[in-house]
């Protein structure tokens, strides 16, 4: 796999640390987009600079997670949010009560939507504003 393919994949899937490391190595000209990605492990990155890039968020990545918030004994709502606190606040503002509990789901979790199978990661790409309700589930 080429560096450009890995870099694009990391940006698309918001794998911040690897994306910012590649960005740093490209900027320092220690790597090119057409190099094999196995070369990344052979090149020394300045970890302090990478951490500064992440802190400045030069790639504009906003991590969005999906949380399951229990509404009652059988009902759950899934909310996309940047943090657990943001999800709880959104839930409280929307439903005017506190959730029973909260659990973070992996973005690659697959489920049925109609007759199709979709992941939360793919569903998130359909949305523009966060926090947002991803859906409901009843046991």
Image (cartoon, rainbow, N blue to C red):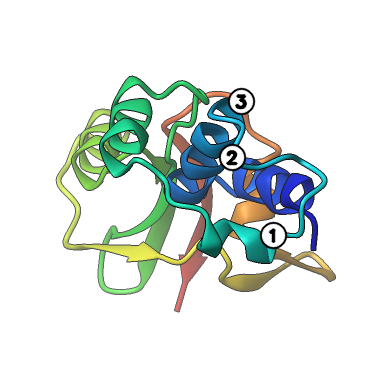
Quadrant of res 118: bottom right
Q: Residue at x 84, y 70 (%)?
A: 115
Between 19 and 130, the one nearer to me in the picture: 19
Left/right placement of residue 1 relative to residue 136 reads right
Name the residue beneath numbered marker 1.
37
The answer to whether marks 1 and 2 mark residues whose Cβ atoms lie closer than 8 Å is no
- Mark 1: give few (<14), some (14-19) or many (20+) Cα within 10 Å: some
Left/right placement of residue 71 relative to residue 11 reads left
The image's mark for residue 30 is 2
Query: Is tag 1's residue or tag 2's residue first in the polypeptide sequence?
Result: 2
Q: Residue at x 18, y 40 (%)?
A: 85
Q: Residue at x 46, y 66 (%)?
A: 106
Name the residue beneath numbered marker 3.
128
Query: Is tag 1's residue or tag 3's residue first in the polypeptide sequence?
Result: 1
- Coordinates of residue 109 in the picture (x, y in percent): 56, 71
Query: Is tag 2's residue or tag 3's residue first in the polypeptide sequence?
Result: 2
Quadrant (top left/top right/bottom left/bottom right) for the C terminus? bottom left
Quadrant of res 39: bottom right
Left/right placement of residue 58 relative to residue 135 reads left
Q: Residue at x 77, y 51 (%)?
A: 35
Quadrant (top left/top right/bottom left/bottom right) for the N terminus? bottom right
In front of the other: label 1 or label 3? 1
Of all residues, the one furthest to the bottom in this rendering is 139
- Mark 1 and mark 3: span between their CA atoms? 31 Å
Between 27 and 111, the one nearer to me in the picture: 27
The image's mark for residue 55 is none
Between 65 and 33, the one nearer to me in the picture: 33
- The vertical placement of 1 against 87, above or below, is below
């Amino acid at each position: 796999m080429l560096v450009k393919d890995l870099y694009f994949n990391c940006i698309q899937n918001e794998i911040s640390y690897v994306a910012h490391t590649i960005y740093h190595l490209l900027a320092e000209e220690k790597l090119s987009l057409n190099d094999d990605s196995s070369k990344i492990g052979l090149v020394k990155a300045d970890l302090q600079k990478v951490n500064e890039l992440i802190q400045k968020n030069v790639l504009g990545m906003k991590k969005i997670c999906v949380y399951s918030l229990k509404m009652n004994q059988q009902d759950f709502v899934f909310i996309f949010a940047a943090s657990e606190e943001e999800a709880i606040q959104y839930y409280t503002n929307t439903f005017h009560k506190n959730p029973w509990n909260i659990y973070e789901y992996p973005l690659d979790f697959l489920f049925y939507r109609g007759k199709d199978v979709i992941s939360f990661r793919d569903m998130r790409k359909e949305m523009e504003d966060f926090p947002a309700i991803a859906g409901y589930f009843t046991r």
